[in-house]
Structure formats: C-alpha cells, structure tokens
Amino acid sequence: MQLTNRAKPVDRSPMTFLESLYLWNIIKGMGITISHLFKRKATIQYPEEKRTFSKVFRGLHVLNRDSDGRENCTACGLCAVACPAEAITMEAAERQPGEEHLYREEKYAARYEINMLRCIFCGLCEEACPKDAIYLSQTFAPANYGRKGFIYKKEDLLIPHPLKEMEAYKKAVGDRAGNQ
Amino acid sequence: MAEEKKLFKVTIDNITIDVEPGTTILHAARAIGGDVTPPAMCYYSKLKGSGGKCRTCLVEVAAGSAADPRPMPKLVASCRTTVMDGMVVKNITSERVQDARAGVVEFLLLNHPLDCPICDQAGECHLQDLSYEHGKEGTRYEFKRRTFEKEDIGPYIQLHMTRCILCYRCTYVADQLTDQRVHGVLDRGDHAEISTYISKAIDNDFSGNMIDVCPVGALTDKTFRFKNRVWFTKPVEAHRDCDKCCGKVTLWQRGDEVLRVTARKDEWGEVQSYEGQPGWICNTCRFDKKKTSDWVIEGPANVSRHSVISQGHYTGLKKPREIMPEVMGGRAPKLLMDIHDVSDVNSVDISALPGPATSETFKKKEL
C-alpha cells in the first residue's frame, strides 16, 4: 500500500572510492553545525536571565488585597468547587469588630491552601472568583526539595500589603493585564 | 354509596388535570409538576394564611371557567386563586407572565445585598434559583440599598434583615408552631423589617423551623454559620426517637462530622409531610444533636442532579477496592507525603464550635 508518492527506493549499490572517504558528508554535516553558531540561541541563562511571559500567562496563585490592604477573599468556596484538580481547601471565619481593616467582608478565609502538586494551572479558580480575590500571576511555582513545600498556605499566597510594603506589592502586581 | 365529588377540569399550559373544588391554581400546577409549576417565594403550603405577598407565582388566566370563559383582566397570584371548572391558565406559555416575573425578581432584588459569596443559604436559596431563571443581568437601581445590622434572634438563629424579602413565613411559623410569638414585622412599606423588640430571645422548642421556611438567607442557623459551604457538605437522611417532634431530619455532614441538621425538604423546597402532618423538627434535634452517634442514618438524601449540592456525587458512591496491600503482600504503599501532616485545614473540629469560627479559634491551635 502506498500512502504518498514521495517514497524513494533505498540505493543499495556499492560505494565508490570517493564516497567511501566520507569527506563530502563530513563537510556537509560540519556546515550545518557551524551555521548554528551564528543563529539565535534557543536557550537562555536561566537564573540570571528570565523569559518574559505573556500577559495571560497562568502561573502561581496570588490572593489579592484591595487598595486599603484588606483581604478580598470571603471563603465562598467557588474556586474550590470550580477546581478540576481539587487542589483548593479553605476554612472560613467570621470577622470580629475591630478586624475591619484586615478583611473586606463579614466572612473571610482563615485557612486557605492550594496544593501545587495537584494544581494544573487552568485558571478556573480565577474565573470563578466573584471578589477578584484570586488570580494567577506571571511566575511559576519554584522547585523545591520536598513535597511539603508545595502545599501553599495563605501566608504564601497573599499579596504584600499595598500600603505597608509598597515595593513588594508593586513587584507582585507586575504588569498584570488590566492593572493600574 | 358516598356522594361522588365533582372534580374541576383545569388546563394549565395546555395540560389538563382534574382537581377537587377549592384547590388553588398553584396546587393544581404542582399536581402536574415540572416546569409548569409557578415558583413561590412567600407561599408555604404547610403554613395557614401564607401567600399572596411576593407575586412571583403570578399566572395568566385565559378563560375564567366553562360557564364564563372570559379571561381575567390582570395576572393573578396562583397561590391564592382557586380553580374553576374549565379554567385555562397560562404560565410558561404566556409572555406576559414571564415579563411580570422578571419585574418581580427585579423588585425583590432591589434591596437585596447579593452577598451570596458570604451567605450560608447560597446553593439552596430560592431567590438565587428564581433570579437565575427569571432575573436580568444588571440592576437599574441607583439609590442606596437599605441596610440593617445583623441581629441575634435567640442563641441559635441569626437574622440578616438586609437579605429579607418580607415573605412573612417566619412569623407564621412562630404563630402556628410555637405558643408565643415574640418577633414580627415592624414599621411599614419600605421601612418594614422583621425584628423582635429589643432582640428578645426566642426560646421556643420549634422556633428553629423558621430557618427552614426562610426562602432566602435572612434567617440562618448560627451553629452552622460560616462552617462550610452547602455544596461541600453531604446530606444524609437520619432519624432519632424524639418525644417532641417526628425526629426525621437531614444531616449535613462533612466526613463523619455533623455540621448542620435540617428538616427534610420535598421537591417544592418545603418541609416534608408524614401521614399528612408536616415534619417540623424541634430545636433539640436541630441544634443540640450534632454527633453522628445521636442519629440512625438511613442513607444519602435525594438531591436533584441539577443542584450544586449534588456536585459531590455521593449517591451510589462505590469506594474503590484498596488493591495495593493485596499486591504487596499486606504491606501498605509508602506515602511520600501525607497531606494531613502538612495541611492546617481540619486541625480544628469546627462542628464542635457553638457558633462561627473566629480568629481566636485558629489562634489557640497555633500556640
């Protein structure tokens, strides 16, 4: 059965003397190698040099704060129910009088964990969030020596305080699409 | 021979059914079932005198009766209008009804805070269902919504007046199930609110049923407050011998913890009836029996597969056979990491708390 017309029969005739020196083939191969020296490199020197990600890159999760530094998350559970990998768990608590500067709404996530071993970075949590509380940033989860390091708790996910740690906050926000 | 009762023939959305005289249009539609049934926010068949307030059940009567086939000029509230022989009713086939219902939803949502992400009722809220089906995407309301401080009605019930749609069901519960009503509707018109005078405690044995009848999240169970989202809990039917009530309940569990106890609901979102008696449950069953050992478990509750509550697929669940120990000669597989060693979640027994968790709850653990 013939699938295409490009099939070539293998040439099995014995090599001539010139051919058996392989000189031409070596030169041809070296030519390809040397031409690559002058082409653009496909790799980068990673820790010193970093690639820029697309604006819609879905990387490590960040729990957002509003402009006063209060946590946006209300532990509504929509991210957890949307998560196809079941990576998100949380526990809610009630805001007490005097905690208004910490949490934006009456209820907040006292515990919030993302299992980065399970997460597939699909971004459905971001889509589901009604409070703009979780978004996927333009970095990825760094390598770690143990699996325990991949259970990200609320402290690891929360964005720096926009008023108290302005530098770190600006860096964390980055050039996220639609951000100020 | 007993005198044969004359049955009335009613046609609702081109489906004809015979019902007894004196039946309301809503009940006739419920007898047909399915999409034909108008939604009801204030009407509750187990509470006498309820209905006629929210106007979500409006239907069009295309022909009043066989004797007088003129149509009714205005849309009528189906929960309060009784059928006549030969009546022709249009519900989902009428554009006027659909339009009116969208308007009613808009009115109900005028002052509603739409704080569903916080609200414990989300997932089983009738107003949520109604606005999904009939509501518009945006609001045209530009004024300040009325707000209230949250209030405690007794030690177990939390009142969020901002969410209330003034259906009056809870006041009927207090009137008809308990011997003394201490809460009611204060003020009039736009200022009307459900309250007790000076937050007077309700300590009646059946007061908890007002949580079940509340179609929105205005009255919620304080012992369940913020403990979990409804769709992450597992509804299980259970019963116990109770000298005060029927003792037949739905337990809302997480693992083996009982997070919440409610009465069983029928397909209309109302409390189920047993031998003609509505299955109200007492406060002891609802608020104090929060251990699995207090109950005899019958099996998973039947939840519509369209409900978000059924997302856990707990009915017909089969636990997969643990094959590793068999293959490995009795040895358990070596876990590279046990999530329970690392995770902070579940380290506090939330079901044992009398109220919502606070920052204190979690601080104690960390010491």
Image: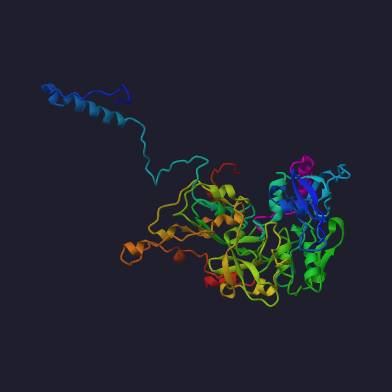
Q: Is residue B243 visible?
A: yes
Magenta part of the chain: B92-118
Q: Residue at x 80, y 65 (%)?
A: B172
Q: Residue at x 46, y 65 (%)?
A: B340
- Quarter of the figure that contains the N terminus of chain B: bottom right
Task: From the viewer's side, name the closer residue of B43 and B132.
Answer: B43
Q: Is residue A88 left or right of residue A45?
A: right
Q: Residue at x 86, y 42 (%)?
A: B71
Q: In the rendered view, would you say B265 is above or below B242?
A: above
Q: Quadrant of residue B194?
A: bottom right
Task: From the viewer's side, name the closer residue of B331 and A141.
Answer: B331
Question: Percent from the top left, x then y, of residue B164?
Answer: 76, 58
Question: Is residue B274 found inside the magenta-colored segment of the image?
Answer: no
Q: Quadrant of residue B156?
A: bottom right
Question: Percent from the top left, x then y, of residue B161?
Answer: 76, 61
Task: From the viewer's side, name the closer residue of B166 and A117.
Answer: B166
Q: Which residue reaches farthest front?
A: B1
Question: Is residue B113 found inside the magenta-colored segment of the image?
Answer: yes
Question: Percent from the top left, x then y, of residue B129?
Answer: 69, 51
Q: Is residue B124 left or right of residue A140?
A: right
Question: Percent from the top left, x then y, of residue A51?
Answer: 44, 41
Q: Residue at x 76, y 73 (%)?
A: B202
Task: From the viewer's side, name the closer residue of B163 and B46.
Answer: B46
Q: How many marks?
A: 0
Q: In the rendered view, would you say B281 is above or below B23?
A: below
Q: Which residue reaches farthest bottom?
A: B243
Q: Quadrant of residue B2?
A: bottom right
Q: Is residue A158 visible?
A: no
Coloring basis for residues:
rainbow
